[in-house]
Amino acid sequence: MGILHVNHPDIEMFINCKNDLGVMNNFNLSVAITDEFMQAVEEGSSIPLVNPRTGEVVKNVLARELFAKIVDNSYSTGEPGIVFIDAINRANPTPHLGVFESTNPCGEQPLLPFESCNLGSINLANFVANGKIDWTRLYTIVESAVQFLDCVIDVNKYPLPQIAEKTRLTRKIGLGVMGFADMLIKMKIPYVSRKALNLAEEIMERINTHARQVSINLATIHGPYSGRELGSSDSYRNATRTTIAPTGTISIIGGCSSGIEPLFALSYKRRIMSGDEFQEINPLFEEAVKPNLSRYKWTNLVEDLTESGKLTEDMIERYKLAEFINPAIFQTSHDIPSEWHLKIQAAFQKFTDNAVSKTINMPKESTAKDVERVFKQAWKLGLKGVTIYRDGSRAGQVLSTGKTTFTNDELKPRPRPDKTHGETTKILTGCGDLYVTPASDEHGLCETFVQLGKQGGCAGAQNEANGRLISLALRCGIPSKEIVKQLSGIRCPNPVWHKGNQILSCADGIARVLAECEGVEIKIKEAPSTCPDCGGTLENTGGCIGCPNCGFSKCK
């Protein structure tokens, strides 16, 4: 997680940095927003940008203009999110130890330097029987979970002694929930309803209250956390007890809905780290609907859902679904108005010690004004942070329905400047001398010129095409190492040796030049060349490439 304070002199650069798709790909970004800033936005006044090292005011900027940039970038790319840093620090249980400046990667756990995350989540769907909640069993699990998380602090192996020290000083834990949407479905309660809000508050209040009592009980046995303020009457074993995490991975393992999110879709494709995709159908929907339809109708309904991800009025009518289910309980995230996303988040935050991780999913047709309204409403509701994601605003999103598409407007190359700077490298290929010129502008590598000696024809045309496509990819923000991965190892019938390396093709030669230019450490596999006569492996012997099996030689 990268968080920068809204008063920092580099804030505008930070807000805009993810416009380049090749920058900070492994970071979540949020801006630390103050109440003073939000009031300046409301009033139309200015705020100072202050050098944090000297305390000197670098310049004053209009809060509304800066806020508009945050909104526009969040609308376009899903980042930055917002952390309401004043709200977070108002809930700081140990202000004498320091103020919060940042959080863990998903924003739900405000941390002081060297503190660590120690989180766990209860699957709420497992506590519904015959449409009612088994509160007694839930209390039992809360007790076990708090004891378990507290024990983790003592038995854990820490990577740094400072982390061990600070973690044991405050003994913060974060018990949370997942499967909330599944619980609502089992209880036949729509996500968009007053009943859902009341249930959210009741569940979290009960979990929070019981977790506090368990922590007090542990403190009577083992003592309260040692980092409490001198003379404090704080009687907890743990400085904080509850947190709502996103549970992306563990909810997959648990077979339940993520965190407190609504269902993303009834049928969707999940993209995993390898880039592979697999189809998922919500099991509660399948359980409710499949027995009431013929095999033929169920197959057709699944195909329809694969395209849309959600129930449409047409589907409800065509398959007569309203006769045996309430379609409202199967509403998906993009059908739910943003204000209801916020209301559910606020209901859980009301009874959560730390913060709540939640994404305000917005449909593709949402506007920047919609994003602005969500941010302002989140502040007024007293949330500690908020993240929006507009469907389709980023290529390669983890969850997608069949109709999520990416248009040409969503990935544009940055303009080519009048002047670029680069050096030409000559590299020998099987087609002749290849001249490769990677060139850079102020943002980094932006284009590559490729010319094949004096040769024209097909090989020359192909290398010109390679150069143009590489240049386009670079200016679209594709990292050079990804281009090298794609080009390296491509083989043609005429590999050659150049400065101790086998150049397998013109594309492979371009990859080597780019790798050297950018310092990309990618091992390029030396695939064996095949003899055109017998199919054996060619070898470099006596300064020439030949086949030891049949005697073929490229020098003859």
Image (spheres, grey):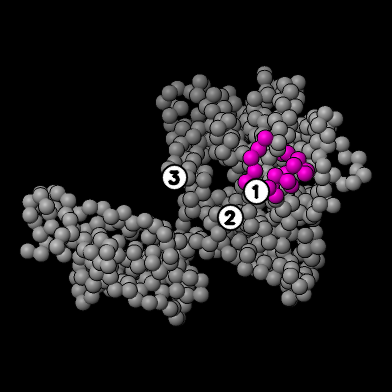
Q: In the picture, residue 226 is in which quadrant? A: top right
Q: Residues within 10 Å of mark 3 (few under 14, many from 20)?
A: few
Q: Is residue 371 above or below residue 215?
A: below
Instruction: Depth check: give the residue in front, 471 or 232.
Output: 232
- Location of mark 3 (residue): 274
Q: Amino acid at mark 3?
A: Ser
Q: Please say whether residue 8 is one of the residues in the magenta stretch.
A: no
Instruction: Locate residue 524, reporting x and y percent.
Output: 33, 56
- Location of mark 1 (residue): 160
- Disc marking residue 27: 2
Is residue 296 left or right of 66 when viewed as pictured? left
Q: Amino acid at mark 1?
A: Leu
Q: Regarding mark 1 in the picture, which secondary structure is present there?
A: loop
Please tell me whether mark 2 or mark 1 is closer to you in this view: 1
Q: Regarding mark 3 in the picture, which secondary structure is present there?
A: loop
Instruction: Depth check: give the residue in front, 336 or 250.
Output: 250
Instruction: Locate residue 531, reporting x and y percent.
Output: 14, 53
Residue furthest to the top in view is: 130
Residue 236 visible (yes or no): no
Is residue 107 left or right of 94 when viewed as pictured? left
Q: Earlier in the sequence, mark 3 or mark 1?
A: 1
Residue at 65% of width from left, 51% of height from top?
Answer: 387
Residue at 57% of width from left, 27% of height from top?
Answer: 284
Q: CA distance from mark 2 to mark 3?
A: 19 Å
Q: Earlier in the sequence, mark 2 or mark 1?
A: 2
Q: Magenta stretch?
A: 155-175
Q: Residues within 10 Å of mark 1 (few under 14, many from 20)?
A: few
Q: CA distance from mark 3 to mark 1?
A: 31 Å
Q: Please say whether residue 158 is one of the residues in the magenta stretch.
A: yes
Q: Residues within 10 Å of mark 2 (few under 14, many from 20)?
A: few
Q: Quadrant of the C terminus?
A: bottom left
